[in-house]
Amino acid sequence: MRSRSGAGVQRDGAGATARRGAGTGPDGPRSVLDGRWLVRGPEGLLSAYARTPDGLLRWTETIPGGPRWKGPDYFAAPGMAALSVAQGPNGFVHFVGRRTVRGKGGDSVELAHAIQYQTGRPLGEWTSLGNPHRDPARAPYIGNPVVSVAANGSTYVFLANASGALAVRRESETGKWLPWQGIKCLGTRSDMAPVPHASGLMEALVPIGTGTMRCYQPEAGVPLVRTPDLPFAPAEQSAVGIETAPGRVTYYWTDQATTGIQAYRDGGWVIPLGGSAAEGRVAAVRTMIDGYDCTVLAYRGLDGQVVFGAFGTGNEGAGVWWAPTGEWCAAAPALALDHAGRVVAAFLDADGRLRVARQGVEGGFTMNPSAQI
């Protein structure tokens, strides 16, 4: 894995702002969203998202492949304690957050959902998804949500309820939100890793206490069911999964004890991949490299560097060569494919500025140095 000088990236346009000042608007502190916060729209344009304490930022390519981007555009999200993002097969980008609503009778905690229907356009209004607890005394103790969108367009929301069990709410195929489903367990963490299958089914890896469980849909339109617990415990906020064969998902995460990256497929064994990751989700994407189906991973190293690894999809056991980039990131990076199928990595630097690196055009897997947006 090599790197070479890349074309510069320029900001194009001032972007939309609601207000400016310390801690607000696009000039405030930034952090990454949970989920795949770098996405490609139906037009082939990439968009990246970040958080401020009271809102959401978005940068968007002006033409497929760059190098010019516009933004950041700012969208208010008041009272939101956490935000998760996922893209559906139609290109819609879904945001779900846990927010506190101020009222005359006191504060209440609920989930809120908003959709970006078109690349570069404003978000729709935030709408309430309620709370799995009707008792206002228990409602504040829910965890942070994780959102995913199935191949049939149905949105799924996962979170820990006040009892530590898993709560799931999903849309029907007609777009109607169904009642909350509870899956009994203890110690559910807020870093579950849902994965939509190409068939339309959904599954998720759910860390619980010192172990992990897996939930899946046995057939379309039915609730998720729990499988026997798995004997490993991902580090917090590290797990991610991708479908690496029809109906078969591979999960990647950081091991709590060793900080190394590990992999698992249902029915197999845990596969150690080496590396040494800091906190944050591992990023994963499938792509063709020199005519071979490959998986590319990225993570934030213990020293803060962005680190890449590439290998044949489903062949992790053959070994992964990790390549530090020498570029520092403040949080875990994100991966996506551009309009030409090239790998693109995005990350925030020490000042909260967005930086983007793109795969080189020469043979093999090379990433150009990043450029500031």
Image (cartoon, helix red, strand yellow):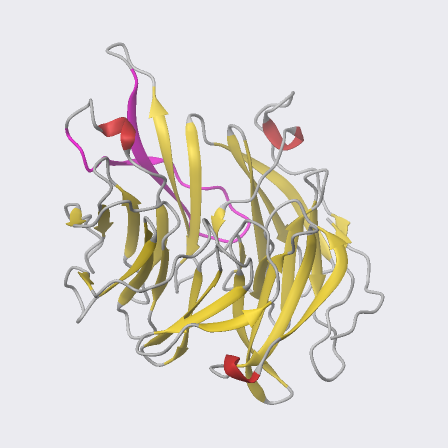
Q: Nearer the viewer, residue 300 or 49?
A: 300
Find out whether residue 140 is within the magenta segment. Answer: no
Find out whether residue 110 is within the magenta segment. Answer: yes
- Residue 361: image quadrant is bottom right
At x 50%, y 45%, the residue is 33
Q: Would you say 198 lies left or right of 43 here?
A: left
> Magenta span covers which residues?
107-134
At x 71%, y 61%, the residue is 357
- Residue 216: image quadrant is bottom left
Q: In this view, does 8 lie above or below 330?
A: below
Q: How many marks?
A: 0
On the question of residue 340 being in view, the answer is no
On the question of residue 305 being in view, the answer is yes
Q: Nearer the viewer, residue 283 or 290?
A: 283
Q: Nearer the viewer, residue 293 or 305?
A: 305
Q: Would you say 3 lies left or right of 95 here?
A: right
At x 20%, y 60%, the residue is 173
Q: Residue 28, percent across and down?
A: 63, 29
Q: Which residue appears farthest toward the bottom when viewing the image?
A: 291
Q: Residue 239, percent across and down?
A: 44, 58
Q: Residue 346, percent across and down?
A: 64, 55
At x 28%, y 35%, the residue is 142
Q: Is residue 314 above or below residue 82?
A: below
